[in-house]
Amino acid sequence: MSSTSKTGHVKEQATNREDTARPIADHEPDSKSAAAVAPSRRWGLAVMLGSLTAIGPFSLDMYLPALPELTRELGAADSLGQLSLTACLIGLAAGQLLAGPLSDARGRRKPLLIALGIYAVASLLCAFSSSIGMLLVLRLVQGLSGAAGIVIARAIVRDLYSGTEMTRFFAQLMLINGAAPIIAPIVGAQLLRFVDWRGTFVCLAVLGVILLVSAMWSLPETLPKERRVTGGLGQTVGNFGLFLKDRSFMGVVLTMSLVSGAMFAYIGGSSFVLQEVYGVSASTYGFIFAANGVGIIIASQLAGRLAVSVGTERLFRSGVIIALCGGAALLVSVLAEAGLWAVLVSLFVVVSSVGIVGTGASSLAMENAGRASGSASALLGTLQFLIGALASPLSGLGGSGTALPLAAVIAGAHVLALLTMLVLLRRKAA
């Protein structure tokens, strides 16, 4: 072999090694995958992927109205009943770290179908739980398997779209994902008129089967073999390491996670604050919760429309500032005892801003993920759940007689989000 050919062979090997070891690189969506989704099917795909991302809210919120009945029948303490919520939340966080890298290596379709099958079976078995211990284990499995739908849905979007088109598509997903927390408790409450708590889990199993059949029927493979990550566990750990070292990626993810943490604090503490501090009835609280959910939907759709003219990064930064203004207004309203309406307007701004920040963050974080978009999606989702799990209980530290802890946690999370954005997402030189 000549020296020239040897040199070329060495360069080719080095290039291949570099390509495998550096998943965080710009790439355009695969032409075959993109062509598989015609513009006429775009909304159908958005509904399918949005439904997958809604597994989390439905798994967490749909059975909440039945929680007191569940704990009484299984002879468990209230704390153990609440632990069934925590078990699912842990599963939803940890499952993304498993499903994301697996989909990078094995493709999107097969891991998704297997996970949906496990989710349906685990949900059905929850309905036949004879003890709280059995239920806790099954809820963990339910969360682990349901996480695949959340993380793989974002990865599929990155396989098919880039730039402002990806931002607009994530806005479409937020339309469905924003409605899920509104619909899930309402559906759960209405189900209890006809079935007991076990029937709620049967309905979740049916939901899993519907999603499984729909994915088998309508969802193509979007990650061809030549674009998949190879190298096993070592490569997976390396991918996570590269993302964790990526300043821009972590800036977006941490900022979004802190804004989501404020949202989790609102979900965990608003019912106590509004009903026990401000005397709002349960039915009125439901209306307020739904109105704030509509705010997320409206804000996300506005972000999708403005993505082309304003730019994704500017939208994201604006959303963080809007969130901070809402959090600050909430804290001032509570400290000044400005009354219920001042609190409600502030909360509406706080919650609605998630539609802008979430749409922009999903697009910015996934844009340069390259072939490891599943791993990027996993980190994005896991950190949101973890920070949310930390922020939610903090909102109730002062007891049910004061709104100050909730306001302080929300405002504090938004201040940290702004600082994170300013430090890690400094503008690049022209």
Image (cartoon, rainbow, N blue to C red):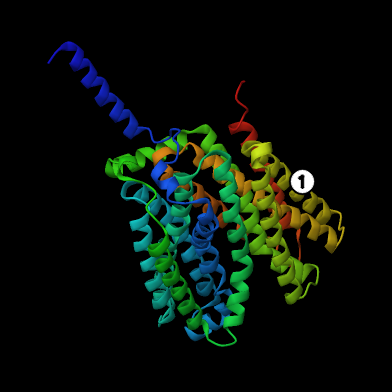
Q: Is residue 322 left or right of residue 86?
A: right
Q: Is residue 254 left or right of residue 347?
A: left
Q: At x 32% / y 34%, what residue is drawn?
A: 20
Asked if residue 188 shows in the view, the reply is yes
From the viewer's side, name the closer residue of 76 and 231.
231
Give the quadrant of residue 184. bottom right
Label 1 packing within 10 angstroms: few (<14), some (14-19), many (20+): some
Please name the residue that numbered disc 1 is placed on.
325
Seen in the picture, residue 242 relative to 410 is either above or below; the reply is above
Seen in the picture, residue 71 relative to 355 is either above or below; the reply is below
Give the quadrant of residue 109. bottom left
Quadrant for the C terminus, please. top right
User: What amino acid type is highlighted by mark number 1?
Assistant: Cys
Q: Position of residue 238 (x, y in %)?
A: 36, 38
Quadrant for the N terminus, please. top left
Q: Residue furthest bottom?
A: 194
Numbered marks: total: 1
